[in-house]
Image (cartoon, grey):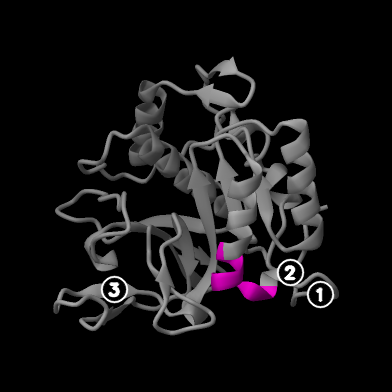
Amino acid sequence: MSNQPQASSIQHPTKTSPFKDVSEFEKELKIFANKYKTIISEHSRRISDYFEMSCYNMMVRYYEHRGYKAMVENEIAGRFRIKCSPSGLIENFSYMKLVKDNAIYYLYHNASVQSAHDTEVFTTPDIVVSKDVKPTMTTNYYKTKKKFSYLHNSDMITFCEAKHQPPFPELMINFIGIVNELKPDCLKTEGILGEETDHIAPSLMMSGIFSKPTEKIAKSLERRYYVNMLGDLFSEPYKKTFSVTGVFEMATLGKKKG
């Protein structure tokens, strides 16, 4: 949103279950709207959805720090319409266009993506970066002729999951299952995945703070795979994790963390 870190009213009732007032999330949305000269449309007021919107903005910040220009695309009736759930057609919602050196990518909320293993299987990450292509439309997904839009797996660059939860073992291990389904090459344990790139590796973004055991799990997974395990994202993430220096410490599609 703003290039300057925002004041925080974060409270921590317990070490691993932070709380952030809804007004702080709404402030973030206003900053986002002002920066990109748009108006936020009606949206869900669930705290988990607010956290997901905040994580989406962190991803915008990541790419801006990496030298991309971010622009609002596909405003609906002059407003930025946020896709807060897997339902609905991708093209009926707004998203961000990311441009760098004549390369164009799109940053989506809740865009369904085809499996890397089976063209008839789909899952919907909370945040998706795609190539400069239009989503595909089909009427063969549901039992009825209801339309379904999705991205081909080959058109997805990377993805993130945003979870308003403290880190816990099952959550992190389950995320590796999603990586296997959508971006299995990122589970390569030896050698180099590919050429160095500034695209972020698949990332699990969590609101809560790592305990000692879960921190060990996170470091182990990051050491083995091309993934990021990001916790404590209520605690001023723009001053550390998504700062101008912090984004260069994350794993990318060409380099493991650390």
Residue carrying label 1? 192
57 or 166: nearer the viewer: 166
Q: Position of residue 6 (x, y in %)?
A: 52, 26
Q: Residues under labels 3 and 2: Cα distance?
A: 29 Å
Do labels 3 and 1 touch, CB within 8 Å?
no
The image's mark for residue 254 is 2
Mark 3 residue element: strand
Q: Residue at x 50, y 47 (%)?
A: 162
Q: Residue at x 52, y 20 (%)?
A: 8
Q: Residues within 10 Å of mark 1 (few under 14, many from 20)?
A: some
Residue type at the position of mark 2? Gly
Residue 209 located left or right of residue 41:
right
Mark 2 residue element: loop
- Disc 3 or disc 2, which is closer to the eye? 3
Q: Is residue 67 visible?
A: no
Q: Residues within 10 Å of mark 2 (few under 14, many from 20)?
A: some
Residue type at the position of mark 3? Ser
Residue type at the position of mark 1? Ile
45 or 240: nearer the viewer: 45
Do labels 2 and 1 touch, CB within 8 Å?
yes
Q: Position of residue 230 (x, y in %)?
A: 64, 44
Q: Residue at x 57, y 40 (%)?
A: 206
Q: Residues under labels 2 and 1: Cα distance?
A: 7 Å
Q: Residue at x 64, y 54 (%)?
A: 173
Residue carrying label 3? 149
Residue 58 located left or right of residue 110:
right
Q: Earlier in the sequence, mark 3 or mark 2?
A: 3
Q: Residues within 10 Å of mark 3 (few under 14, many from 20)?
A: many
Q: Is residue 95 above or below residue 171?
A: below
Q: Earlier in the sequence, mark 2 or mark 1?
A: 1
Residue 140 located left or right of residue 97:
left
Residue segment shown in magenta: 178-185
